[in-house]
Image: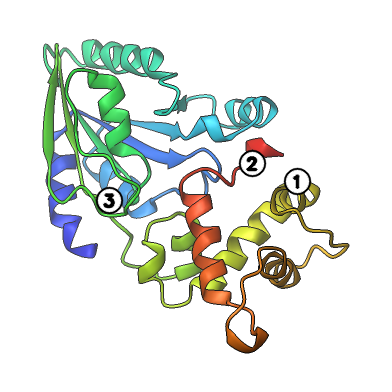
């Protein structure tokens, strides 16, 4: 998806305000620092928008609000947080002396950019999918005095860690070279959050908090076997990644 960088560059150049979309479950991991640097070079106002907040518990959200007081927290699934976001955009646009505010929405692939636009626009609809890379070009949506530009998700040129990209769901599970390692990275992330909760989700009994051992127990519990009783690591990995991707496996569960 590095080929989309020129398109995103144009979005940044042609926008008055940029919305940098982050995953509320892992805001630091989902920071696209190359995008941030580009926005800063153009000296454009940037709002950090934490999406997928419906996948977090109340206490987790409050911690994030304390850590990121200037961020906006939204959920496309529950259609919450968008009134405050839209108000913030309009206030900034007025401060800039703009009659029509052009808003660019940028971030990693599959961060929920199109869903944010859909909720801001309501009547207008951009294409939304759980498949990374759904948005291939720019899509303009006019909403009153706002013109909102969707953009294809981009991965920093320096970012080639497949486990991180899998955790971000910035790559489709089927296109990962080693989905097993990505699945273990997800399990490790969740074990750090709530070891008892993740074990309860997968219905396994395990004293260890080792992600490799948990992965093996999940395969046994779900009866993922190949011929000869060999554990089917590939099938298990894809299922874990998909459940993380679609929000079924989430921190709020714990």
Residue 213, image x, y percentages: 75, 71
Precedes in sequence: disc 2 or disc 3: 3
Q: Could you tell me which quadrant the N terminus lies in?
A: bottom left
Q: Is residue 14 left or right of residue 152?
A: left
Residue 17, image x, y percentages: 24, 28
Q: Is residue 127 above or below residue 29?
A: above
Q: Which mark is residue 236?
A: none
Residue at image coords 21%, 16%: 96
Precedes in sequence: disc 2 or disc 1: 1
**Of the residues tagged 2 and 3, which is closer to the observer?**
2
Residue 190, image x, y percentages: 67, 52
**Would you identify the image quadrant in which residue 174 lies?**
bottom left
Q: Return the residue at label 2.
A: 251
**Would you identify the image quadrant in which residue 191 lies?**
bottom right
Q: Is residue 22 above or below residue 145?
A: below
Q: Secondary structure at mark 3?
A: loop
> Do the numbered discs 2 and 1 sit on residues whose CB atoms are within 8 Å?
yes
Q: Which mark is residue 153?
A: 3
Q: Return the residue at label 1.
A: 197
């Amino acid at each position: 998806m590095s080929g989309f960088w020129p398109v995103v560059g144009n979005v940044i150049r042609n926008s008055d305000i940029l919305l940098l979309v982050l995953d509320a479950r892992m805001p630091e991991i989902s920071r696209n620092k190359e995008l941030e640097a580009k926005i800063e070079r153009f000296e454009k106002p940037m709002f950090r928008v934490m999406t997928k907040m419906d996948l977090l518990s109340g206490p987790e959200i409050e911690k994030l609000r304390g850590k990121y007081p200037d961020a906006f927290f939204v959920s496309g699934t529950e259609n919450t947080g968008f009134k405050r976001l839209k108000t913030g955009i309009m206030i900034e646009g007025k401060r800039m002396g703009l009659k029509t505010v052009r808003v660019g929405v940028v971030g990693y692939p599959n961060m929920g950019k199109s869903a944010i636009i859909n909720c801001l626009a309501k009547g207008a609809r951009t294409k939304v999918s759980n498949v990374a890379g759904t948005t291939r070009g720019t899509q303009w949506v006019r909403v009153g005095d706002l013109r909102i530009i969707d953009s294809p998700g981009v991965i920093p040129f320096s970012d080639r860690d497949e486990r991180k990209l899998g955790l971000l769901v910035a790559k489709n599970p089927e296109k990962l070279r080693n989905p097993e390692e990505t699945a273990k990275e997800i399990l490790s992330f969740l074990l750090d959050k709530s070891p008892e909760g993740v074990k309860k989700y997968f219905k396994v009994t395990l004293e260890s908090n080792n992600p490799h051992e948990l992965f093996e127990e999940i395969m046994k519990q779900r009866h993922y076997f190949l011929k000869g009783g060999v554990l089917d690591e590939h099938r298990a990995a894809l299922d874990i990644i998909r459940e993380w991707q679609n929000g079924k496996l989430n921190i709020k569960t714990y």
